[in-house]
Amino acid sequence: MERAERGQRILEAAGELLLAWGYRRVTIDEIARRAKVGKGTVYLHWKTKDSLLLAVVLNVKWRSQRQHLTRMRSDPLEILPSRTMRSYYGDFLKEPVLRAVHTEDVDILGRLSDTAKKEFAELMALSDQVLLRYLEVLRHHGLVRSDLDVQHQQYALLSTSTGFFMAEAMLYDRAPENPEVRGDLLAETLRRMLETSPEEFRAPRTESNSLANSLRYGSMEEAVAAAAPEVIALYEQLEECSAAEMRRQLRE
């Protein structure tokens, strides 16, 4: 068995046990048994239980980043905050480890959540920088409002999205039953709060219409096409750094 394939099997086994048993009960012996490898083989890949389980968390987030890049490359409209976060919300609903991370589920993650914040501090800081620059790019191309401070927009985007993610655990008995409806509500909230509407791009250029006159493109599609390469490059950088962090967690 190739080293990479063996490592992936160990990661999958560790993820299954993390969800089924929680951080405290998972052992390297059980992971090895589930992956059908020797205990020593697990340690050939990861130095400790924590480094392996951190890799499980990072692998899930990295996979979501790659899916996001694929969506943006196939449909540039996915760069809009409402579309981006709606799609990410869909990833969140489908991936139990991602849900545990965003809701800080201590039954599953135990102390792993605090450890991840320390281990991935540089990556999290880069993610914040990328998000801020992403909003600046969209503002430059007229795709989000420019009458708010960009850092306030970043906070609004993060806090609103986090609220929807946390509501899955805290408001499950009051939420719309259909997850598509919940995703649509998140998208509509962000669209109204942050984005320039398609109609504003098509509005007549008159002396009284200062907003229309300030827009550089005749349609939202033109603005999106112009902004997409720079946005994609930003997220490619983040995805590459996540891959590098994955390699760092491996035993040399």
Image: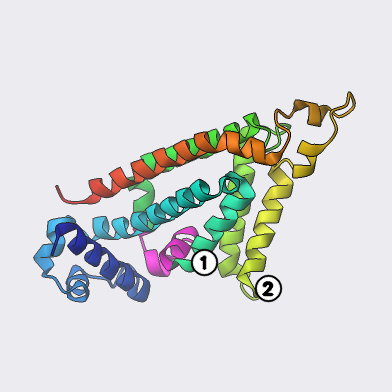
Q: Position of residue 166 (x, y in %)?
A: 57, 62
Furthest residue to the right?
208
Tell me if residue 185 comes above or below residue 140 in the rendering.
below
Picture quadrant where residue 156 is located: top right
Callout 1: SS: helix
Residue with the mark numbered 2? 174
Of the pair 58 and 90, the residue shown nearer to us: 90
- Kindly report the distance in space between the C-alpha atoms of the residues bearing marks 1 and 2: 17 Å
Give amino acid for label 1.
Leu
Tell me if residue 190 comes above or below residue 49 in the rendering.
above
Q: Position of residue 102 (x, y in %)?
A: 49, 58
Q: Residues within 10 Å of mark 2 (few under 14, many from 20)?
A: few
Q: Residues within 10 Å of mark 1 (few under 14, many from 20)?
A: some
Q: In this view, does 99 lie to the left or right of 143?
A: left
Q: In this view, does 92 lie to the left or right of 250?
A: right
Q: Which of marks 1 and 2 is nearer the N terminus?
A: 1
Tell me if residue 230 comes above or below residue 20 in the rendering.
above
Q: What stretch is highlighted in magenta?
A: 96-112
Whether residue 135 appears in this view of the structure is no
Q: Contact, CB < 8 Å: mark 1 with mark 2?
A: no
What colouring style does the render use? Answer: rainbow
Q: Is the magenta stretch mostly helix, strand or loop?
A: helix
Furthest residue to the top?
207
Residue displayed at 69% across by 40% down: 220
Magenta-span inclusion, residue 100: yes
Number of numbered labels in the structure image: 2
Q: Residue 93: which numbered mark, if any?
A: 1
Q: Where is residue 202 in the image (x, y as percent from the top left)?
A: 79, 38
Residue displayed at 61% across by 72% down: 172
Q: Is residue 144 left or right of residue 13?
A: right
